[in-house]
Every structure is written in structure tokens, then in C-alpha cells.
Amino acid sequence: MIIRNLLKHNIKYIAILVTISIAILSLAKIGKQTVINISHLDKIEHAIAYLVLTVLWLLSFREKQHQLLVIACAIMYGVLMEFFQANLTTYRSFDYFDMLANTFGVLLGFLIFRMIQKKQYKLLNSK
């Protein structure tokens, strides 16, 4: 209960922290990671990052009229990060598949958020 209340009252700050973290990780010079050798692991990481980003921002702005704006901003953020990688760094590159993975993560995050909303709605109306 305490953790839930902390999250509820600080979700915007957590969303901001995740947004900044994605920007840093997207633009930082990161060496080759060879700990886990899974094909296209980076695309999975992109999708998960943008899924979390989207869910956090949707939880921050729960009103239905803000949901489309949150989704559009999250997708645009993923596209911008790819352009920034190509134009602001010499060690990162633009990748359409990263953009697709980001967008997939956003859409999956929206679906998960909607499922959570429906479950909460059912719980509230069953009492």
C-alpha cells in the first residue's frame, strides 16, 4: 500500500526520469555488449523501453483525451532519438528498425495500459 501510494503521487517524476534515461542511453557512446548473445536483442530493448515510457506517461495523464497525445508524443520521441543519433553523434547511427521497435513498444504499452484500465473499471463496478 505504501509503495502504491508513493508510485501514485510520483508517477510523473518517474516518467520524466525514464524519458531522460532513454535520451541518455540513446545518445551515449556504449561499447559492444556481449554478455547475452540473442539475435536482435537491441530491438527488444527498444520496445521494452518505449513500452515502459508509454505506460508511465499514460498513468500520469489518465484522462482519455490525453491518451492520443501521449501516444503521438512517445512515437515522435522515438523518431527524434533516431534523428539525434544520426545528427548529434558520430558514434551512433539512424536505424529504421529501431524506430519500428520504439513504435511497437509504444503501441504495446498502450494496449497494456488499456487492459489495466478495463480491469480497474471492472473491479470498481463490481463492488
Image (cartoon, grey):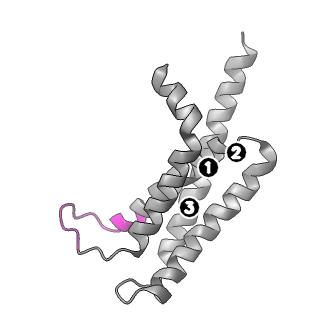
Q: Position of residue 91 (x, y in %)?
A: 34, 86
Region rendered in magenta: 32-43
Of labels 3 and 2, the one closer to you: 2
Residue positioned 37% across, 90% down in the render: 90
Q: Tell me if label 1 and label 2 are in contact, CB under 8 Å.
A: yes
Query: Quarter-wise, where is residue 10 in the image?
Result: top right
Packing grade of label 3 (10 A; few <14, some 14-19, many >=20) is many
Which disc, if any, is residue 104?
3
Find disc 1 in the rendering and name its residue. Answer: 57
Of labels 1 and 3, the one closer to you: 1
50 is higher (above) or lower (below) than 13: below
Q: Position of residue 111 (x, y in %)?
A: 63, 46
Residue positioned 61% across, 49% down in the render: 57
Lateral position of residue 29 relative to residue 54, left or right: left
Packing grade of label 2 (10 A; few <14, some 14-19, many >=20) is some
Packing grade of label 1 (10 A; few <14, some 14-19, many >=20) is many
Q: CA distance from mark 1 to mark 2?
A: 6 Å
Q: Tell me if label 3 and label 2 are in contact, CB under 8 Å.
A: no
**Amino acid type of the residue tagged 2 in the rendering:** Phe
| Secondary structure beneath label 3 | helix
Q: In this rendering, does residue 13 appear at all?
A: yes
Residue positioned 56% across, 69% down in the render: 78
Find disc 2 in the rendering and name its residue. Answer: 61
**Amino acid type of the residue tagged 3 in the rendering:** Phe
Q: CA distance from mark 1 to mark 3?
A: 16 Å
Q: Main secondary structure of the magenta part?
A: loop
Lateral position of residue 14 relative to residue 64, left or right: left
Q: Position of residue 14 (x, y in %)?
A: 51, 46
